[in-house]
Amino acid sequence: MKFKYMYQQLLSHIGIITVSFIIVGIIVSQFAENLVYKNKEEELISYGNEILQELKFISIYDTVTLNGYQEVLDNRNITIWQFNAQGDIRYPPDKKNVRIRFSDEEWSRIVNGRGVTVTMDDRLGNPSSIVVLPYVKGDYLYGGIILTAPISNTQAIVKEFNDYLVMTVLVTIIISFIISWFLSQIHGRRIKQLQNATSAVAQGNYDIRVQDSDFDEIGELASDFNKMVQRLKKSNEEIKILENRKRQFIADVSHEMRTPLTTISGIIEGLQNDMIPESEKEKGLQLASQETKRLIRLVNENLDYEKIRSNQVKLTLEEIELADIFEIVEEQLAIQAKNRGSQILVELEGKPIVFADYDRLIQIVLNITKNSIQFTENGNIFLRGKQTENYTIIEIEDTGVGIDPKDIENIWQRFYKADVSRRSNPFGEFGLGLSIVQQLVRLHRGEIYVESEKGKGTKFTIHLPLKIEKDSKS
């Protein structure tokens, strides 16, 4: 059976409030009742002591004084009684010789000169509050006076107070119910909104947003929910982009592999069937060798990326002169740059040292320089280096076509190739080179940045720290 949260909250609020008011009401009612009776007793004792003090100076049995007081106390609905040493009534006159039934404990207190108070008693007629004040001189009891007040008046006061208390409790509970209903509906709607939004997200809708605030925990939960949905949306978009690029990559790889494999297969078949003239065999074998190397590059780039991503690459860090690295890169790529009508220029400030893995550093500089040559025709590729207090800075700048601003953030992503790069070239054709470069730079605890302007060229800047903690060497 489904029990809505709003009703649970409402029931708990009203239950707690009702129980609390009932307990408080009982305690307050009991306290008020005791207070009213106590006030009545104190009033009777006050009048009694005043009467007794005056009788001591005249006569304990002076009826004139008692009559005077009785006339005054009639307005208070209080009756005066007087008894002698034996407990017989002496006043009022019409109750003479009537004996009061005192208990042994009460009589013992009276004989010893202590008063007796009874909240409710009917031994003198109607149920009344009774106060007994003895007159003892030395060890002898001369008698005493009794003051009684009907409890009906006191009960009426208590009942009136209880009626007001009940009305107050009922009104308070009704108001509390209305407030609780209002608040429960608000919280219920907010939770329902989160529930509906969660269901929408479960169905793949990441554009949903709920109203949040920092007023309470539900508002903070809504804020966290919105942040979660934004991250899920971003992750989902990245996954879609990655999947699209992966599909495109597979299509590209299939195309790239099919062409050399077809070429190699044709050459092998021609050699087997003596379909290639002797003068063309060497050229055919050379072409097969080039296509084989092309396939090896494709496989190696993928293997490199997966090794780096899964932390399987071990770095052997050492101090290397940057000039040596630039010299090797320049020697390897000079012909390729020349074929594009470009040249590689090296510019060094002093003799900068790099703290890096030798092979991986060459791989980093080679990949970026290849990329620069690919997009630079009849221009220059600059290899620059300098050393600061904490870093070695490597800059690779070209005067090529540049990168569209909307593509700059994407060049580091795996499988990404800008449209301009979708051309046949002998290196970097698989869209993995810069992804590998970024991962290798991070393994060295370094940073890599790119600046580019369409039609004016691109500059890659690498910051490599001069010292790396031992745990970063793997």
Image (cartoon, rainbow, N blue to C red):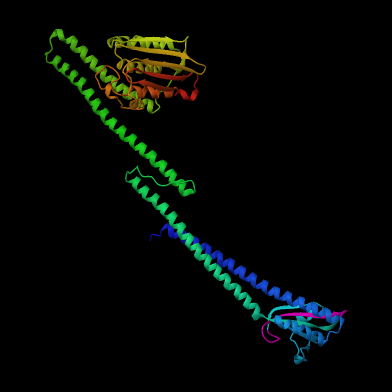
Position of 184 relative to 326 (above/below):
below
Residue 137 within the magenta-colored segment of the rendering: yes
- Identify the image quadrant of the N terminus: bottom left
Residue 357 is situated, as x and y percent measured from the top left of the image, at: 43, 18
Query: Is residue 14 visible from the viewing direction of this image?
Result: no
Residue 54 within the magenta-colored segment of the rendering: no
Q: Nearer the viewer, residue 296 or 379?
A: 379
Residue 440 is situated, as x and y percent measured from the top left of the image, at: 40, 22
Residue 19 is situated, as x and y percent measured from the top left of the image, at: 54, 65
Q: Nearer the viewer, residue 407 or 70?
A: 70
Q: What residue is rendered at 23% in x and 23% in y?
A: 257
* Residue range (magenta): 122-139
**131 horizontally vs 408: left or right:** right
**16 horizontally vs 363: left or right:** right
Residue 251 is situated, as x and y percent measured from the top left of the image, at: 23, 28
Picture quadrant where residue 65 is located: bottom right
**234 horizontally vs 50: left or right:** left
View extreme (top): residue? 279
Query: Is residue 58 visible from the viewing direction of this image?
Result: yes
- Identify the image quadrant of the C terminus: top left
Q: What residue is rendered at 76% in x and 85% in y?
A: 81
Picture quadrant where residue 149 is located: bottom right
